[in-house]
Image: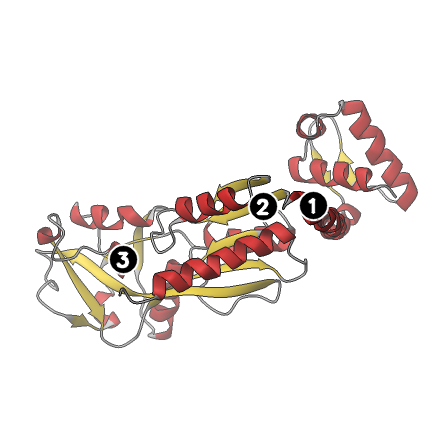
Amino acid sequence: MELRHLEYFVAVAEELNFTRASRRLHVVQSGVSAAIRSLEREMGVTLFDRNSQRVALSDAGIALLPEARATLDAARAAREAVQAVGEGLRGTVNIGTMTSVPLVDMPGLLGHFHADHPKVTIRIRVAPSGSAGLAEALGSGELDVAFLSLPGPPSSAIEVRPLAAVPLVLVVRADHPLAGERRVPLARLADEAFIDFPPGYGNRGVVDRAFAAAGVERRVTVEVADIATGSAFVRHGLGIAFLPAFVAPTGGDPESCDLAVLEASDTTLTWSLSVATAATRKPSAAVRALLDLVDEHVREAAAPDM
């Protein structure tokens, strides 16, 4: 079995299209098809169910995919370790992140990393399906590192380093009947329309669990994927929202006069940010260097001003 054949297999498995895989690999399509046939003959199985309309992984292909990724990761790590001796770090780091999370200066962090390791290619993917999707992409090998928010304990498939924890506060319009109160129980919110993230996002999971534990049903009528826009939807009368404190309006905000910020009185709601890697794959040298830089970044952010 050649590593090249596994590389071709992974590309086709991710693209589910031989033409797109050949373009990604910069190889003619016939060469990709021949490599897949050779791999199937060697293993004695069909790896893809394919016809003129579609390409799909077979059961054998599904079983092979994580092992093929792990084998390619191990080969890459060995190659990078040798190259790093005399040439500095090389390779690619695939990073998943969320939108509008100011707790980590992502451009500054990655700019610092690029300055230290210019031969490492950085690829960034913003979460299309929230932290749940990022965790799944880590487990499948599509991502090397992810900045995510999990509503509960992580699965055994990923390793998590906590970075920060922020209270979730309730934001309502200043003319809302609850606006004059500082703390409110969840039961008082049963008839409200809520603005929240789609299922799969960490803060949505935290709030859903809290209401379920309290035996209170709630209505989510607006789902947004950008945490920074939550207050704007509240301001325009579309509902109320539990938002991380770092995006909630404050007294110094010129637009805060038409909004009020409250707390839940019968539960503690916390939004957490973590950096995660796959538990089943050894991080490459480039990933380890990035994680070290993240640790340094967090320590500096937490240090008191002198």
Q: Tell which tag, 1 or 3, sits nearer the viewer.
A: 1
Q: Are marks 1 and 2 in contact (CB under 8 Å)?
A: no
Few, some or many residues within 10 Å of mark 2 (<14, 14–19, 20+)? many
Residue 277 or residue 151, whichever sits in front: 277
Image vertical order of residue 4 relative to residue 268, above or below:
above
Residue marked by disc 1: 86
Q: Which mark is residue 246?
A: 3
Figure quadrant of residue 251: bottom left
Q: Name the quarter where the N terminus is drawn.
A: top right
Few, some or many residues within 10 Å of mark 3 (<14, 14–19, 20+)? some
Residue 200 or residue 143, whichever sits in front: 143
Q: Is residue 104 left or right of residue 236?
A: right
Secondary structure of residue under mark 1: helix
Q: Which mark is residue 93?
A: 2
Image vertical order of residue 190 relative to residue 118, above or below:
below
Q: Amino acid at mark 2?
A: Val
Q: Does residue 205 appear in this view?
A: no
Q: N-terminal of the two: label 1 or label 2? A: 1
CA distance separating discs 3 and 2? 28 Å
Q: In the displayed orientation, state which residue is furthest to the front.
A: 86
CA distance separating discs 1 and 3? 44 Å
Q: How is colour applied across the structure in the image?
A: secondary structure
Q: Does residue 293 appear in this view?
A: yes
Q: Residue at x 45, y 43 (%)?
A: 111
Q: N-terminal of the two: label 3 or label 2? A: 2
Q: Amino acid at mark 3?
A: Phe
Q: Residue at x 21, y 46 (%)?
A: 232
Q: Residue at x 63, y 62 (%)?
A: 279
Few, some or many residues within 10 Å of mark 1 (<14, 14–19, 20+)? few
Secondary structure of residue under mark 3: helix
